[in-house]
Amino acid sequence: MEYKFKKIKDIIKSYKKDDIISACDILNLDYKKSWKKEALMAALEEGLVKYPTELYYVLSHDELVVLEKMFKNMGSFIVKDTRIEVGSSYREIEAFNTLCDLCLIDSAVENIDEEGAMVGYVSEEFANVFSPFIDENRMSHATYLDETAALIKGCLYYYGAMHIDELYDVVQKKLGGLDKKLFTRVLSYKYSLSDAFLPMYIGEEEYIVDRDFPVYFEIKEIYRWGKGMGYRNYSKEDLMAAADPLFIENMKLFSPLYDYFKKFFIQDQESLELFPEMPKDFFYDIYMADTVDILRITPLSSEIIQDFLSNMEFRNNDELEKGLNLLTGYYNNISRWENRGYTPSEVKSRKLEKSNVIPMKAYLGKKKN
């Protein structure tokens, strides 16, 4: 058995020009958009050969595992059932997607056969270049790098925007120590973070902000966030869980909220006409996830709640009131960026505790009298 593709360029040429440009961007390679496809192919090919170390930092442990299997099987790997939405097959499909984004495997991998299988191929030249990066130590280190990236995502979920030094401080403490250069390398290279954050500046001070942050806030607004409060201390497990794009905060309160509104949801006419084959539950799930995500971020929470309720068909005011209580109860118990990760209920509780504390000077004065 031999490799189906011998050269890196044999794989790259199966992709469109825009795909190659995107791969060059991921690897931070120099190019000009005016270049013809052949020139872009050459730039990407050269980058993959010259910068395997940088590519290693781009990829996740799951993607390295798939490449390792391909190298051991003369460049091919089969995801046997792409219809499985969880577990190892799902992770393998996600890995294939990333490898396609980098033009590393044959683009025909996107073709699924009648049995739901997906076959991917990598070139022999790339295997020779990159196989030294597939060893036990580097695979273990890749897991550590993935944890670092997940913690960064978790911080962005709960805090929204942090000075880069504060972000580093939180992440390194959760990991029990982390080299600053390695932290910077993860921020710069890790593909899983490519659409998660933006760097913003106040003068020369750098802040790492959630990608949605500029939609709702100006960077200088963080000066008035959580005055007198530090960042809420979430555990390592909490932060890593929040890195999952499907993460829903406070499921104990969300589940009854989800179940209650489901029977009142009105699907908009436009989506019905565009996607008549899609079940109503599909649109409801998207609507709920989007509402919850916006609700915990936006300063216009009352408007979001009113808009949400307007897309429900209640039979009477009692049903409306119950729904409103469920929704506001949930809102008060999920994190807010301007609260430095605390929920509105926690902030209220802290203020009450603070107002009940007798200042030390007053206490000593009373004691003297």
Image: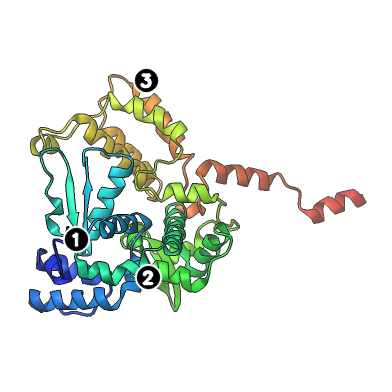
Residue corresponding to mark 1: 105
Report how far apart the C-alphas of labels 2 and 1 lie in the structure: 23 Å
Q: Nearer the viewer, residue 32 or 213?
A: 32
Residue 24 lies, in percent from the top left, at 22, 72
Disc 3 residue type (three-letter): Asp
Q: Which mark is residue 318?
A: 3
Q: Quadrant of residue 228?
A: bottom right
Which residue is rendered at x = 56% and y = 52% of the image? 232
Q: Quadrant of residue 267?
A: top left
How packed mark 2 is, by other alpha carbons closer than 10 Å (few <14, some 14-19, many 20 or more), is some
Q: Nearer the viewer, residue 315 or 241?
A: 241
Which residue is rendered at x = 60% and y = 42% of the image? 349
Residue corresponding to mark 2: 188
Of the 4 image quadrants, the one containing the N terminus is: bottom left
Viewer-side label of 2, 1? 1
Residue 352 lies, in percent from the top left, at 64, 43
